[in-house]
Amino acid sequence: MAVKPGSIDEKFLGTWRMVGVERIEVETGKRLDEDLVQTGYISYTPDHRMMVIISHVKPDGHEEITCYAAKWHIEGEAVIHSIDIAIRQPWVNTRQVRNFNFTGNRLTLTPPVSEDYVHKSVTRRSLTWEKVEG
C-alpha cells in the first residue's frame, strides 16, 4: 500500500525527534514524570512501517527504554501501530492507538487514557515530535 501524494499518510513520513512529553493523572490532575529526562525518535516510512525508540532517565540515573517496530495505518483521527517486535514483550501483536494532531512541523500523538503500570493510576499522556529536516 503506497502513500498517496497529498494524503494525511504523507504528512507522517520521515523522522521525528521528541520535543515534549506530558503525563497527567486523570483523578487528581497532577503532572507526573516532570523530573525525567526523555528523548526519542520515531520514523514512518512510505511502505507503512515505523520504528520508535524513547529513553526515560530518572533523577537517580536509572534509564528505561521503550522501543518497537510496527506496521502503521490511519483510522479516522488515529494512527494505529500494529506491533511486530517490542522491548516490552506483552506489546507484540497488539494494536497501539494514538490520536494525532499536526501543528506546523510538529506532530502530537496521544494514546487513550489508560492505567499507568509505573504510577498505578489512570493517566492521560501526549508526546510531541518535531520533524527532523535533512
Image (cartoon, rainbow, N blue to C red):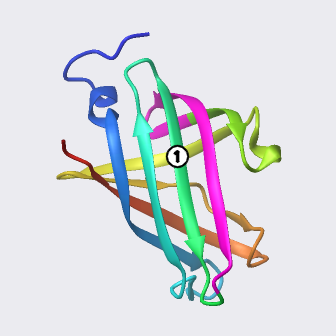
Dominant secondary structure of the magenta stretch?
strand
- Give the residue type at disc 1: Val
Residue 125: in sight, yes or no? Answer: yes
Q: Quadrant of residue 82?
A: top right
List the single residue furthest toward the right: 90
Q: Residue at x 70, y 35 (%)?
A: 85
- Pick the quarter of the image with the N terminus: top left
- Name the side, left or right, on which 82 lies relative to 99: right
* Residue, disc 1: 52
Per the image, label 1 sits on a secondary structure element best described as: strand
Residue 77: in sight, yes or no? Answer: no
Residue 49 percent coordinates (x, y): 50, 26
Residue 17 percent coordinates (x, y): 35, 55
- Name the side, left or right, on which 98 lies relative to 67: left
Q: Residue at x 50, y 33 (%)?
A: 50
Q: Quadrant of residue 96?
A: top right
Residue 41 higher or lower than 36, as above or below: above
Q: Residue at x 46, y 65 (%)?
A: 39
Residue in the foreground of this view, choosing between 119 and 52 = 52
67 part of magenta stretch: yes
Residue in the foreground of this view, choosing between 75 and 105 = 105
Residue 30 percent coordinates (x, y): 57, 89
Residue 16 percent coordinates (x, y): 34, 48
Q: Residues within 10 Å of mark 1 (few under 14, many from 20)?
A: some
Q: Read off the magenta span.
A: 61-80
Q: Total marks drawn?
A: 1
